[in-house]
Image (cartoon, rainbow, N blue to C red):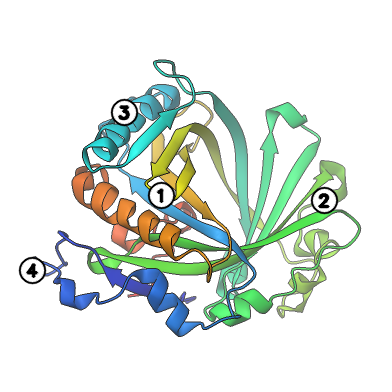
Amino acid sequence: MLKRLVITAALPGLMSTTGLPIRAADAPQPLYQRMIQRYPAPALKDLSGREFKFLVDPTPFAKEPKAAFTELWQRVAAAAEKAGFSTTSRKAGKAPKVEATLKEYFDTPGQDLWKHGYILRVSTKAKKGEDIRTITVKAIHEDTLRTLAAPLTVLGVTATVESEGNVGLGRDGRLGEYIEKGATWEVRVDRLGSLTLGDFGKFMPELLHLGLTPDTRLVGTRVYAVKSKPGQLVLPGIGAFSVSMEAWSRTEGGEIFLLDLSYRSEGGYYQNAAAHRAAERFMADVLCRDLRELARPDSGKWGGSKVRVLLNRPGPE
């Protein structure tokens, strides 16, 4: 089973799974400092930023995504202001604009791609037409340095390759971080053939070096995703971070079974100490402490990853 290397730091005011308070002494340093100690420069120099992910329990919110997003953003904005942060809304008093996407995660029936350290996703956006597919392959190797060294070379089309840190609530009420590297490109659906491993491998040959044959059958796990950017989180002395919310359902217009809120800090890992510190403090003080009743009850199992929940791949113990 794939295990991601996760660096953790304790959060003030949270309880461990034993019911005992997590002591400040358990986390003498912020998470980003521990990451830097583990990976001194220039190991993380290619990271474009860090995404902070908070899994939300959708049960108390409206079943319709726009209404759920409005309710969630109001709760977050109020808690942020109370904690000394500030927020801006795109359109005050109006429901946030949403974008719908059909996402399908492909793997073998035994999840061999995941076991080898890869995620393969095919996305369709209505505004791009039914014949265009966005392909994303992510490297999620157990070893962070191996993830960053993954070629993810794409042939025959223009691709974007990006590495980032992902911060989420882990087990025992701690923040953890793992590194992903992803390549994204667009193709017409007729170029994907019958969606075998070889059909994707002709664009990314790396996938054909995993010990699986090109005719390996891939099966899809489909979700209907609705995403919104309701506003920005303003961190004192740092600047504004764009906030996103995303709701997943198993059928179009169906009941929300996964809901999250995320925000992203941009820039080099080794140059942004103040931004790292402020972004971590918002997640610790506002999301994971003041709004802990909004968290998905089993959040610690997934490290902020909706894909882990979808594919039932809990994070490392």
Give the number of the mark in front: 4 or 2: 4
Determine whether 95 is above or below 37 in the image.
above
- Residue type at mark 4? Leu
Disc 3, SS: helix
Q: Residues within 10 Å of mark 2 (few under 14, many from 20)?
A: some
Q: Label 1 to label 4, Cα distance in Å?
A: 35 Å
User: In front of the other: label 2 or label 1?
Assistant: 1
Q: Position of residue 69 (x, y in %)?
A: 40, 29
Whichever of callouts 1 and 4 sits on the residue coming sooner in the sequence is 4
Sequence-first disc among 3 and 1 = 3
Q: Secondary structure at mark 1?
A: loop
- What numbered label is drawn on residue 192? 2
Residue 286 placement (x, y as % from top left): 26, 47
At 28% from the left and 48% from the top, the residue drawn is 287
Instruction: Read off the residue under disc 4.
Output: 20
What residue sits 54% from the left and 81% below the top?
143
Residue hosting label 3: 74
Q: Quadrant of residue 162?
A: bottom right
User: What residue did someone put label 1 on?
Assistant: 237
Query: What amino acid does circle 2 point to?
Result: Leu
Contact check, label 4 and label 2, Cβ < 8 Å: no
For the residue marked with disc 3, what is the amino acid? Gln
Discs 1/4, front: 1
Crowding at label 1, few (<14), some or many (≥20) Cα neighbours within 10 Å? few
What's under tag 1, amino acid-wise? Gly
Of callouts 4 and 2, the N-terminal one: 4
Instruction: Kindly tell me whether residue 259 is visible in this rendering.
Output: no
* Circle 2 SS class: helix
Query: Quadrant of residue 159 in the image?
Result: bottom right
